[in-house]
Every structure is written in structure tokens, then in C-alpha cells.
Amino acid sequence: MKKIILLLPIVFGTALYAQTPEDALRFSFYPQNGSARNMAIGGAMGSLGGDINATFVNPAGLGFYKTNEFVLTPNFNLNNNKADFRETANQNKRNSIGFGTSGWVWGFGDRYKPKNSYAVSLAVNQTANFNNQVQYKGLNNYSSFSEQFAEEFAKSGRTIDDVLNSNSPYPYTSAPALYTYLIDTVTVMVNGQPVVQVKGAPEYILDAHQAIRQEMARTTTGGISEIALGLAHNYADKWFFGGTIGIPIVTYHSVTTFSEFDTSANTNNHFNQFKYTDDFKTTGAGANLKLGVIYRPKEYIRLGLAVHTPTYMFLKDTRTTSLNTFLENPVNNFSVTSQTFTNQQPGVSKYTQTTPFKAMLSASYVFREVANVKRQKAFITADVEYVHYKGSRFGSANENPTDAEKAYYKQLGNVIKEDYKGNFNFRVGGELKCNIFMGRLGFAYYGNPYKDAPAKVNKMLLSGGLGYRNKGMFIDLTYVHNISKDIDMPYRLEDRANTFATLKQQRGTIVGTLGIKF
């Protein structure tokens, strides 16, 4: 991955402007969620229609409805995470409960044109589930977490007194590091002249060609729940048009702990260990629009096109950190929280975020497509989706943003454009029907959003399920096996390549849908 410049947090009072490039992917790089039927066929819903999940994929698919329907979709997630950090393998698990597409669809015909019909849907879907846990540890003789604080302070041009005041510009980073002596100024001789440098305590261990032990643990909760109103029109059973207005509601909470330990028996390096804890929350809401069309040139062929506008969100971050540093020879323990430097209040940032736009092409082939769905035997369907990841943007939510805010968000936008790219995702699935019972299989692949990743990054979903439909009631049960490969950078440095962990997450999701036609 190309070196990413260090994004310095800019703080005024208790306001924090410290969004990072990872925030851009958090709300865009996740697999599609939906009803059990939709998940069983890999999430391919761009041209198929006849499922409430069309509300969130291609709303033109709602045009196939001619009756009313109520749907409820709970799910259960089994997480199994593996992380490889500094050639050390780590494993942890965390299970969670979620939900897929649930709600109502009302379909009604046109009394004057029998081949025309209309449909309205009101649905909710947990489009992203953040409930997870990642832990890793390893030995590092290359860099230290503390060096990011030393870099920040050294390049700030500020004095220690400037940073260690009750309205510090760096309350989450170099201020607590200076306060607890995790970093400090030292005088060294360069070409016979004394030069003041900023150095982290663990760096003395690295200078002695020894390793420090690093440990990271992050627990995340929350998700994105989207409420949507969908409208669709069926024209002559050949053209289907639809649109959806979506309102995503965001809740995200992470607690991250990073620790470093002296692995040597040498007490003259003065450092023993430190523990840094970051408690971070994001809440907010936004709006988006999904538009789609499906064309049926033959009874057994369906072609679909859908466009999802960027989601424009108003978000609020709150953040509190703590740092405990343990020194030796002499033995001293120092502790501080970020609220020491923010007038005893948590840091707050209100900002806007625009997610990437999406475009989708799809095709389906339905065997024995006839008006009587009981005589339909099977279908195969596939989607190709483009996501413009590098189009994510952040901005100030203030009416009159300062020049510092404008500069910060411009810099962040440049980093996102430099680090991410547009990418294609693929979904394919099929169903075989035997009277009132159905069997389904699906596959989905979500490609690498990074321009130049140091390791493989992708998501693959393998799915299968069963369905039952009889006398206006239907029950679907699906299992989805999600294999995700990603990277995690615990900290970023400017003067060298960043160390990172490779993550392999295997999430099994059991999805059940109960529906009633009325």
C-alpha cells in the first residue's frame, strides 16, 4: 500500500476533527444483506424481482408484485476471526444477532390496463452489522506505537507547555504521551552540535536492536439500519421501473486497546510497558436514492439496471482516550485521560460523509416463465456491480467552517483518492423448484477496494438454502459462509512503511424469513 500521510487531529475546545481513511470503507465495504431467499442466491437481485429485498437493490423488481406481503427476517452471526501480525497467528470469536429485510409490500393492478400494475414497499434492513472482535499480538523490532505521537509533536512546532494545557490541540495523542512520559524531548549531538529531538520510550529498546511485544484488541458493536420506501410500476409486463428513498441510521461503537511491553531484562532503558485505550462512538443518519429498471424482452429473460446515489450522512463522533505508562529505574506509573485536556468533556465532532455511488447490471433466465408461478421450475441470475470507493468524502457540518477544517477535510479527501479505487463486485445464484419446495445456491465476490494493498483484500460468500411456499405462507432458511480478507493498521507513521495485521474473518450467518401474502 502506498504510504499514507499522517492525518493530524485538529481540536478546538472539545471539538475533534479526526476522521481517517478507514472511516470511508467502514460505511461502504460490506456484503449485501437481505431476505433468506435473496441471501441464498448470493444476493443477486438486480433483475429477478418478486422479493422485498428488491427495495434495497433494484426497486424495479417490486413491479412484479400483484398481491400484498408481510416479511420478517431475523439472523444469527457466528464470527471466527484470524489475524497474522508480525508472523504471529491469533484467533478470536464473537457471535451476534441481527436482522435482514423485513416489512410490507402492497401490489395492486390497473383497472383500465390489466397488464399494468403498481407496488409500494415499506421495509427496514440491517445493511451492515459491526458486531465483531479482533485481537492480535506479536514481537516488533521495527517500529513503536509511540512514534506516531513523537512525529506529531516534533512536526507541530509547539512547545510542551502549548500541548499540556487544558485546551490542548492534541488531547488524544501527543498530549497524553508527553504527560505520562511515553514520549519526551532529548538532546543529542549532531555534527558536534546539540540538537533537541522527540523520542518515544520504547524507541530505546528498538535502538538496542531488541523487540517490543505489541498487543491490540478491538471490540465493535452497532450497525447501519436502513428504512426505505420503494415505489414501482409495471408497464405491460415488459418494462418495470422503480425508485427507493432510503434513510440509513448509523450506530457504531469501538473500544480499542493497544499495549507495548519491554521484552528485555534491561532496566536501564527506563521503559516497562504502556496501555492506550480509545473509546470511540459514531451516530447519525442520512439519505439516499436508488433507481432501477428491468426489461423482459421474452417471458423467460429479465435484464436489469440499477443506480444507487451516494448516501449523504450527518454524523457525530464522540471520543475519550486513556493512557497508562509504566517506567522503570526509577519505577514510576503515570495515568491520564483525554478529558484532562478537553475541559473534562469527551471530544465531539459533527461532520458530513458522502459514501460511494453504485451501479449494477443484471440478467436472469427463468425456466418455464408463465403467469402461474406454480409452474415455474427454476431460474439462474447474476449481478455485476461497480462501487466508486475513492469517491467517499468528508466535510464539516458547521455552517461556517474554519480554514483549518476545510484544509483538514481536503487533505483527507486527497488521501482517500490516493489510497482507494473503484472496483467490481459479482453475485450469482439460482433456484430449483419442486412444487411447494425450493432449493437455492449462490456465490458472491467483493473485490479489493485498495489501489495498492500489501496483502489480499476481498470478501467471498458461499450460500445455500431451502424454501417452502403454500397457501399464502412462505418460510425460507439460508446459511451464508462469508470469508473476508482485510488488513488492519494499528498506527501510521510518515518516515517508514506501516506495520499491519492481515485479517481473515469467517462469518457464518443463519438467516430465516417468514412471510405471509394477503
Image (cartoon, helix red, strand yellow):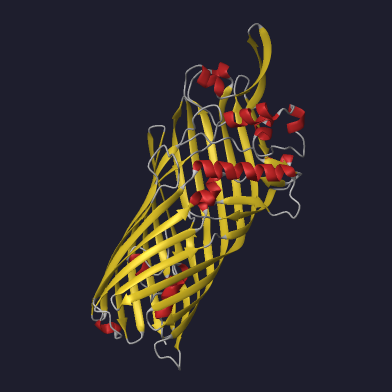
What residue do we see at 69% from left, 45% from top? 406
Q: Nearer the viewer, residue 108 or 134?
A: 108
Counting from the top left corner in percent of width and height, residue 142 is at 48, 25
Spot the residue most to the front.
297
**In the shown orientation, is residue 218 left or right of residue 201?**
left
Q: Quadrant of the C terminus?
A: bottom left
**Which quadrant of the figure has residue 371?**
bottom left
What residue do we see at 56% from left, 60% from top? 311
**Which quadrant of the figure has residue 74?**
bottom left
Counting from the top left corner in percent of width and height, residue 405 is at 70, 45
**In the shown orientation, is residue 439 left or right of residue 63?**
left
Q: Nearer the viewer, residue 420 or 221?
A: 420
Check the image and report above or below for 136 versus 289.
above
What residue do we see at 42% from left, 51% from top? 423
Q: Nearer the viewer, residue 67 or 84?
A: 67
Q: Is residue 502 in view?
A: yes
What residue do we see at 64% from left, 37% from top? 8
Check the image and report above or below for 481 versus 295.
above
**In the shown orientation, is residue 433 left or right of residue 22?**
left
Counting from the top left corner in percent of width and height, residue 207 is at 52, 18
**In the shown orientation, is residue 292 left or right of residue 402?**
left
Spot the residue most to the top.
192
**Which quadrant of the figure has residue 386?**
bottom left
Q: Nearer the viewer, residue 471 or 262?
A: 471
Check the image and report above or below for 368 versus 203.
below
For the image, the number of numbered tags is 0
Q: Is residue 99 in view?
A: no
Check the image and report above or below for 289 versus 508.
below
Counting from the top left corner in percent of width and height, residue 283 is at 61, 57
